[in-house]
Image (tube, grey):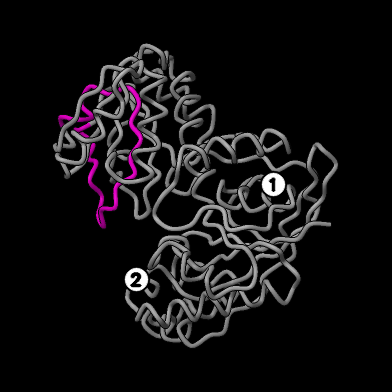
Amino acid sequence: MHRFAFVIHPLSAKRDVARKYPFVKLLPESWVEWGLRHKSPMMVSRITGVRSITGAEAEGWFVGCPLTPKLLASLPLEEVYRKIVDTVKIAEDLGAGIVGLGAHTSVVGDGGVTIAERSRIAVTTGNSFTVATGIEGSIKAAEIMGIDPSNAHAAVVGAAGSIGWTCSQVLADTCAALTMVDLSHERLEELVTKLEGSRANVSVTTDIGSGIRDADIVITVSSAVDAIIEPHFIKRGAVVCDIARPRDVSVRVVQERDDVLVIEGGVVEVPGDVNFNFDFGFPPKTAYACMSETMILALEGRYENFTLGKNVSLEQVNEISRLAAKHGFKLAGFRSFEKAVTNEQIERIRKNAGR
């Protein structure tokens, strides 16, 4: 039996904590934040029933780091590292061979490198499979919306970053046109030369509005701290996949544009009869891609650091995609702003877009 663990943390001081402790709804948020800062990590639930189509089996645990995104971003980095390492220590003691860093614990500081150096078990951020499912989800969503990816104009916002560059390489060989958007024009021009000979007609810009205005498929992965994609930037009938955290896409897009499809990447179907024994808002037997990467590596018996730091290579994306297919993990649906996107919603958006 292979064993893994996955680090989770509250996204909201009051909302998420109140699920377990309802009385915190009555307290000021600053009090709840103070309490979380001084709370110890804990084992949250045991995960059972993960079974590969190869017959391999795995069990795991959710281990809880009690820091919110606000605390992870504002506390001294060394204090944050200690709290995450203490959380990983629980996974070690439970017998996990690999641990995945969930949500903001995967991006704080150096993206898991220091955590891995201070841990006795393997660590991954899950970003390779997040990229893989983001691209796969974007292409699948485009097809559902009536867009032929091979004839489509794609755009990548944050293309000069490591994840954006990986997405750009894939889309350059998939679509007819590709616009790479980033603030670093010099870096963009450097990347253009590396895409010479690719299928797509490649262009670059530092202006987001003009860069995505004609795009049928947009993948956005910037490191902006606030939303940078507004409703009037987007082409009617387009698909926008927001991989960035914090989100690049303004919530106003889904409020004001009922003719574009915004997704956060894919919901992954986990093989076997998995029971997470914890409600993180997903349909039964499905998980985030980052969680799934951890399970895939465990089923493969690869207790090794896989995706760490700020770089995600095309080789890592291809490798985790290959292993996902081998073990039976597959895309099961879409999410947008932490809610499932239904087929009825997609059909309505498609109709509003005139497709």
Asked if residue 333 is among those painted magenta in the image, a careful observer would answer no
* Residue 245, position as x, y percentages in the image: 37, 53
Q: Earlier in the sequence, mark 2 or mark 1?
A: 2
- In the rendered view, tell whether residue 192 sits above or below residue 316: above
Q: Horizontal and vertical percent for residue 190?
A: 21, 35
* In the image: residue 204, left or right of residue 123: left
Q: In the rendered view, would you say 58 is above or below 35?
A: above
Which amino acid type is marked by label 1? Answer: Pro
Alpha-carbon span between mark 2 and mark 1: 31 Å
The dot on residue 284 is: 1
Query: Is residue 232 highlighted in magenta?
Result: yes
Q: Is residue 141 above or below residue 162?
A: above
Lateral position of residue 191 relative to residue 67, left or right: left
Judging from the image, what secondary structure is the residue with disc 2 in?
A: helix
On screen, residue 111 versus residue 197, left or right, reads right
Highlighted range, magenta? 210-233
**Residue sitting at x 36%, y 15%:** 199
- Residue 286 horizontal side relative to residue 162, left or right: right
Q: Amino acid at mark 2?
A: Ala
Q: Residues within 10 Å of mark 1 (few under 14, many from 20)?
A: few
Label for residue 73?
2
326 and 20: which one is in front?
Answer: 326
